[in-house]
Amino acid sequence: MFDTLPGFRDFPPEACSRRNHIFRVFRTVARAFDFREFEAPILEPLDLYVEKSGEEIVGQLFHFEDKGDRRVALRPELTPSLARMVAARANSIAKPVKWFNVGEHFRYERPQRGRGRSFYQFNADLLGEPGVLADAELISLLVAILETLGLSESLFSVRLSDRASWVLFLDSLGITEKQRPVVLDAIDKSGRRKPEQTEEALENASPGKGAELLEQVNEIKSIDTMDALAKRLEKCGEAGRSRSSEWSRLLTLLEAHGAGSCIRIDLSIVRGLAYYTGFVYEVFETTGEGRALAGGGRYDHLIGKLSGGPDMPAAGFAIGDMTLSDCLEGNGLLPTYVSAPDLFVVGGNGQEKETLSIVSRVRRAGYSASYSLKQSAFGKQFREAGKSGARYALVIGEEEVAEDSVTIKDLGSGVEKRVASKSLVSKLEGLDEEGGLPGRE
């Protein structure tokens, strides 16, 4: 007996239906925002991820040498593939680029709640537009997806921060460009560490200043209003005032999108990845429990870095299916799908050919139809029809064959109606329009 590999999941029909419900919402809302779906290979050159994240990423990947002696890896994320694809079409692609993807990704990490070695992710990216209109569009898309899934603003919040503002703050505190990555990393991890651990990390980055830096960082992290943020940015001179204006404009745009009530200024959000250059954000349940439901931000220099070509303004976010599913289930928002055919066709002995002909005809008309695969009496077939969940049975017995007709039976009420075989589909469509049959996809 073989077990599922650690960190991987089975999706039997019920679970697959719930997963696909989430995927349908992703696609429906993204298309409403005029994002176009794309796909990329699930296997990419290992160096694509090393170039983005450094050699340390290798230990987190499923990687191997293929039969052509190429170092390859199962994709852990989609951004490098996106960058490669867009860079290859940079001279011909229409801008702005608004692309999304729903796909499987892989990371060789310790499995834990909300994180597996195989996971699905929704990615949305907007490239070619440097202004905050792009950031507002993406954050509004993210909010719209969560609201469409049933999460109200009382259940989640978008915690908004800004790497560019942090650069200005750190410059004003005397942190050099060389010291900046380590300090930002310490700030990013500070919410998950004891204060003395954060102080130690800051001390290592800037010897003799650890305690002072921790005090200043905590003061900045406590800012949660635009007024307080504007006052702090004012101390950073003209660059600070310019950034304050961008903050104000983004918040105004989000209000116009109808997403403003979900936004919280939270400068503790830094995002650990070094390539972020502007506004960054993460979504959490308001209970404060669990991992981030989604996260993203602006990464204006990554396309150029990965492609070796010119930089291209870019921003995007990702939603992981595992934490999102846990959140929806915990709030009773994952629907229970009943898998049932629209119709169950019951045929008499000797009417196998006519039965299959009717099955084929209604399937071609767009209905799901089932029938008994066993040669059995009418009574057993009707019991099987009842267990199937279908509302209507189509009956083909000797009389129906002789009259070239079909009997439609409501399996709930027992009401029957015989119709000419040639008009069967039109009769079913009439029932469909009256709400008598389940909706067809």
Image (spheres, rainbow, N blue to C red):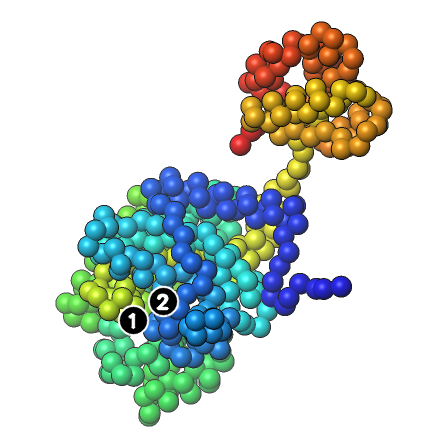
| Residue sitting at x 80%, y 32% | 374
Q: Which residue is mark 2?
A: 267
What kind of residue is marked 1? Trp
Residue at 81% in and 29% down: 375
Q: Are marks 2 and 1 in contact (CB under 8 Å)?
A: yes
Callout 1 environment at 10 Å: few (<14), some (14 to 19), or many (20+)?
Answer: many
Residue 226 on image: x %, y %? 30, 59
Viewer-nearest residue: 295 or 239: 295
> Which amino acid type is marked by label 2?
Leu
Q: At x 62% / y 25%, what residue is drawn?
A: 360
Asked if residue 77 can be seen in this view, the reply is yes
Tell me the residue at 60%/11% (across/down): 423
Mark 2 residue crowding within 10 angstroms, few (<14) / some (14–19) / many (20+): many
Drawn side of residue 377 relative to residue 248, left or right:
right
Give the residue number, with chain letter if any, for mark 1: 166
Q: Residue furthest top?
A: 403
Toward the viewer: 86 or 311?
A: 86
Q: Is residue 72 above or below residue 365?
A: below
Query: Looking at the picture, how far across and down is residue 192, in whole percent?
Result: 49, 74
- For marks 2 and 1, give the CA distance: 8 Å
- The residue at the far left in this view is 238
Callout 1 secondary element: helix
Q: Quadrant of the N terminus?
A: bottom right
The answer to whether 387 is drawn above or below residue 95 in the figure is: above
Q: Is residue 166 depicted above or below 346 in this figure?
A: below
**Mark sitting earlier along the chain (2/1):** 1
Q: Nearer the viewer, residue 245 or 16?
A: 16
Give coordinates of residue 238: x percent, y percent.
14, 67
| Residue 362: image tag | none
Q: Which sits in the foreground, 410 or 355?
A: 355
